[in-house]
Image (tube, rainbow, N blue to C red):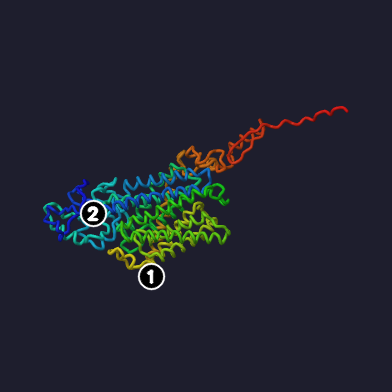
Amino acid sequence: MPLLTYGSLAESNSSFFTGPESILSTKGTNVIALGQDGRIFAYDSGDIAWVLICATMAWLIVPGFAFVYSGMVRGKNALSLLLLALLSMAVVSLQFWFWGCKSSLLSNLSHQVLTQQFHEFSIQNIDSLAFSHTATAYIGNFDQVGYTNVFSEPDIIANNRVSLFFTFFFFESIQPINLAMSSFSQIPTIVFAMIQQMQASIVGAVSIGSAAERGRIGPTMIFMFFWATLVYCPISCWIYNPNGWAYKWGVLDYSGGVSMELCAGMTGLAYSIFIGRRRGYGIKMHPHNVPHVVLGTTFLWFGWMGLSGGGTLANVRGAMVMLNTHLAACAGGVTFLVMDFRLERKWSLVAFCLGAVCGMVAIAAPGEFSGFIGPSSSIVVGIFAAAVSNLTVAYRHNFPWDDGLDIFAGHATSGIVGVLLTGIFAQKSIASSDGFTHIDGGMFDRNWKQMYKQLAWAGAGGSWSFIVTYIMGFSMIIINRIPFCSFRVDSESEVKGIDEDQSGETAYAPDSYMFQRPPTIMESKKLRKFRSGFGRFSSHAGTHSWSPKKPKSVEKPRKAL
């Protein structure tokens, strides 16, 4: 897609417009580009820069979860959690490029404002599993792969400065220079596809924590590729694609309450059941590095602001959704901290971090991207989500699965709370603040039926994520039986640590206090051998030191008086 110039597409009543040959005006800052089929597009340079910045900010969510997970586990497994999160981001991103998404998320505007004729002019050849405009109500197609024609296609998003009705009727009559299929569009498809790719990779990084301290890295990455294809892409198609059944039904969740958070939580639950409990489960294991948890939370907080603001482009509504995200995180952190203080009489820094994450997770459905609720309602959402998650964490050891990193307790429960509260707090006036979005609102607007739509959507998305992930786990039993391809390490490697077994590296020096583990079976045999043969062999904090036996004291003869 070659760049023609910087300027704007002149309006019919503009003094710069003198005919079809001078339709391009140099008075403007838009990026004027020529498509492969001769169509001319005008992209807003400010929105392009804003979305790219937000996509970069959103990427920090991945290392944020990596550091949180790394700090929550024992020191001998810290490095593996960092590697798993980054690898899952890479694998899901490659899957997203290959066939997950070759186009961007179509906004409500393309179906609520534009005619079908203009829609055909502006969007074509965007076939993918998640966002294909020729998709069925359940899944896309495989007509093209590898982001084909992404560069040459616009993404029809809200244009606050130019009437898209005017764009269609005006350019329809200009045939000589093929401007009949020209378009005012805020950003090109490749820009918005980037932030959608970040969202998909975040879901993979969240759910991968279910393999903590016992999962093998290689088979887990194979699993993640097929999981993104069979679980994430269908759910995204249901709610994001205008042809999806949830989208058509009027479900209010355009930012990932189910497709991101509930999907990640139920995926983590199914995978943890499939892979089994950790060795020594039931013994209270404290986070080995609380500063890592705090560092990861700061990355998450910063990145979530970008993920929120990037979906609304550079406008006032973006400020609203970013404010909602921040307030929900603050309310969630304080609530979780106070509820933990009630039990332990200690002000836990980890509790505040977990509560802040729960607040950001819950606000995904009503507050991000779409901005359906106001700041006051976002605080209520954060409080409810943190309270429910705190109670789930308190009783997690009563469950028959090992949710050591609180993926189900934090993401699934908070995601459900956010989706259901959207059916209560969503308001027409807030959603229409951008000038084009129209919803029926929630129970605050006397739309009582919205609640059962939200409940059905949460049940469908959560059930699909759990059942398909669980079936995938047992369908890969063949891979699990191949030597060196089992999904779980053996007991010897689990005692030794995933870092040393899978990576051959450790996060800390062997003589560090952080590197604590009991001796393995082979090391215990060596212990007995050294003790019986050469001297006393002592083991502390995973290190071994040898000291020779002390010679027996010989009583000296007394001197004669």
Instruction: Work out whether residue 141 can be spotted.
Output: no
Report x, y in % for residue 385: 46, 61
What is the distance, in whole Å, between disc 1 and disc 2 at their CAs? Answer: 35 Å
Name the image quarter holding residue 220: top left
Q: Residues within 10 Å of mark 2 (few under 14, many from 20)?
A: some
Q: Secondary structure at mark 2?
A: loop
> Which residue is most to the right?
561
Find disc 1 in the rendering and name its residue: 443
Q: Are marks 1 and 2 in contact (CB under 8 Å)?
A: no
Q: Secondary structure at mark 1?
A: helix
Q: Please determine whether, in this image, residue 491 is positioned above or below residue 349.
A: above
Instruction: Work out whether residue 154 can be spotted.
Output: yes
Identity of the residue drawn at 55% across and 42% down: 515
Q: How many marks?
A: 2
Report x, y in % for residue 482: 45, 40
Q: Which tag, 1 or 2, sits closer to the chain's start?
A: 2
Identity of the residue drawn at 35% across and 60% down: 319
Q: Is residue 485 left or right of residue 395?
A: left
Question: Residue flagged by tag 2: what amino acid is it?
Answer: Ile
Q: Residues within 10 Å of mark 1 (few under 14, many from 20)?
A: some
Check residue 48 in the rendering and tell me which mark sits there, or answer none: none
Q: Is residue 204 left or right of residue 185?
A: right
> Which residue is most to the bottom?
446
Question: Residue flagged by tag 1: what amino acid is it?
Answer: Met
Front residue of this view, candidates 284 and 156:
156
Report x, y in % for residue 96: 34, 48
Find disc 2 in the rendering and name its residue: 123
Front residue of this view, candidates 513 and 286:
513
Name the image quarter holding residue 453: bottom left
Q: Is residue 494 left or right of residue 312?
A: right
Name the image quarter holding residue 560: top right
